[in-house]
Amino acid sequence: MDTIEKIKDLIGSNKERGWPVAVRDRIAFPEPSLLRITGANVALTFLWTIRDSVVPFLEKDNLALATNFYTPAGLQNMVRNILSNPYIRYIIILGEEYSTNANELTSANAIRSFFKNGINKARKIDEFQDSVYFDKNIPLDLIEQIRKNVELIDLNKQFPNSSLKEKIEEANKLIKSLEKKGPFIEPMMFGYEPIDESFPYEDGPILVHGSTIPGSWLKTIYNIYKYGKKNLMNANTDRWIKEINNMIVVIHQPQDLDLSLNPFLIPLTIEKIEAYQKEILSSILPEGKAYTYGNKLRAYYHPNPDEIKLLVNTAEYKDFEFKQGPWLDKNIRYNKAHCEINQIEDIIDVLKRDPYSKACIALTWHVSNELMRKHKSSPCLVLLQAIVQDERLNLTVFFRSHDMVQGWPENAYGCAAIQKEISDKINIVPGILTIISGSAQIYNNYYQQVEGIIKKYHNIPLIFDEKGNFLIKIEMNEIVVSLIHPKNGRILEEFKGKTALELKNKIVNSMYNLDTQHAIYLGSELILAQQALENNGRYNQDN
């Protein structure tokens, strides 16, 4: 059997015959249904650029594969696909980079670092310790063979000031002119390390409260890794995930930018956070991107400007809240064939007129684009709602699908920036930020890294109980438990009894969803108080 036939005969991680053997459903070219194995030498990544801006314009004869490359963790799948198709002898980089800073831990820099320095004995890349890991089933010497036999051609570095079109033209010249080479090894497939099974739980939402974004993320990741159900991202894919449906994270101090706790797989910097916040606060859509949340929220596309003008100019239309007037379409930019709605400014103007409005919702979803959910770039952030309560501006955000490892941290800081913008403009302080993730996922190529993060930070105290603190004492031959307001120290409720069991039942019937660590602490203290009461001893809380 020749090499081409051997490659065709491989069984990929999605259990289907052929190649690519990893993340086939995410490869832009060839399409997942197309079994195209030709001995072509070139693989090309266009990083964060939308595929429709690149793939239709590429020369295909000597092109084996073309794909996005979003995160450094994708290196393992790159290695699997090259070792299973060793005709690949060149990798071309072009397209939108997440950041052009040479020190940022981006996917483009991870590829560069891999080809320059290789991996260490811990199966990681030195600069990317927590974000990249290579499965133990893939021999280190074979990974090194890729570095020796595959040439990296970095058009972004060679032509930093060229347009996307010019880089594609250069890539096409290379695809046609590069020296044709044979395979550097026999095609090989490798298994996957087993993962820990999930713990059982009652299913449905899991609620996490946290003070800051880093601390909230740690608690969230721990819960998904421990309780997440094993599921597939899509049919006919090998992208397994651990998933919680409707993961709810409440961040009580979302404006706190202290990064002394920085547990993320790719550590965040103030500069990186500010760059992301700048994008989400802008309506501009950069070249090569299908969308940004900033563009969706601040330049929401509507195909019929005349329909919107009816809000102001038709006498039959009645606005019962704020009456008719030019303020109704103040935040709309009219063009000939469409108009763009700045939903964030609209929310701000509504709250200025009615601070207690419950109608301050912004959407990114266009039903006409998402028919049968086939759109290639459906936004994950679907809607947000701003509500004033206790004279604070609270923000609730819903994501339909959420990469909790790489995407969630920056998304959280971006949502906090939107919250701050609204609160500043209506002169009300920011309150809590609630992020609901319909499908909260940890991808299988992050499992080992997440395990390492959890082990590294498992001793950091992350208790945060907004429901209050408990003061326990013995008084008049009874145990008295007082629930204390966490901020002003006022006694909210008192529970009295002679045994821990009696008090447990009273507290459980009164309190909702007590923090587990807080509940265990309370139980142990009540036992000590009961023993002291029964033996005429002294009880001092936390003694």
Image (spheres, rainbow, N blue to C red):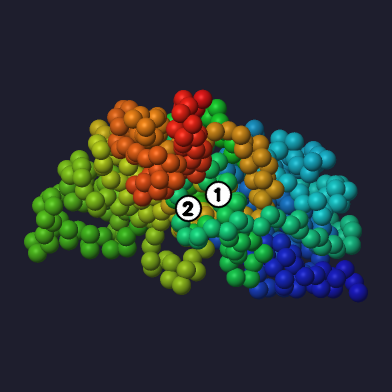
* Quarter of the view holding residue 14: bottom right
- Secondary element at image label 1: helix
Q: Give percent across and percent down for residue 447.
A: 67, 51
Q: Nearer the viewer, residue 164 or 414?
A: 414
Q: Is residue 529 above or below residue 345?
A: above
On screen, residue 382 versus residue 103, left or right, reads left
Q: Is residue 67 visible?
A: no
- Secondary element at image label 2: strand
Q: Give percent across and percent down for residue 130.
A: 68, 40
Q: Residues within 10 Å of mark 1 (few under 14, many from 20)?
A: some
Q: Residues within 10 Å of mark 2 (few under 14, many from 20)?
A: some
Q: Is residue 123 visible?
A: yes
Of labels 1 and 2, earlier in sequence is 2
Mark 2 highlights which residue?
A: 206
Q: Nearer the viewer, residue 249 or 79?
A: 249
Mark 1 highlights which residue?
A: 223
- At label 2, which amino acid type do we have? Ile
Q: Give percent across and percent down for residue 370.
A: 43, 67
Give the quadrant of the N terminus.
Answer: bottom right
Q: Residue furthest front?
A: 535
Q: Residue at x 33, y 28 (%)?
A: 489
Asked if disc 1 and disc 2 are in contact, CB closer than 8 Å, the reply is yes
Q: Nearer the viewer, residue 480 or 120?
A: 480
Q: Give percent across and percent down for residue 134.
A: 76, 49
- At label 1, which amino acid type do we have? Asn
Q: Residue at x 34, y 47 (%)?
A: 510
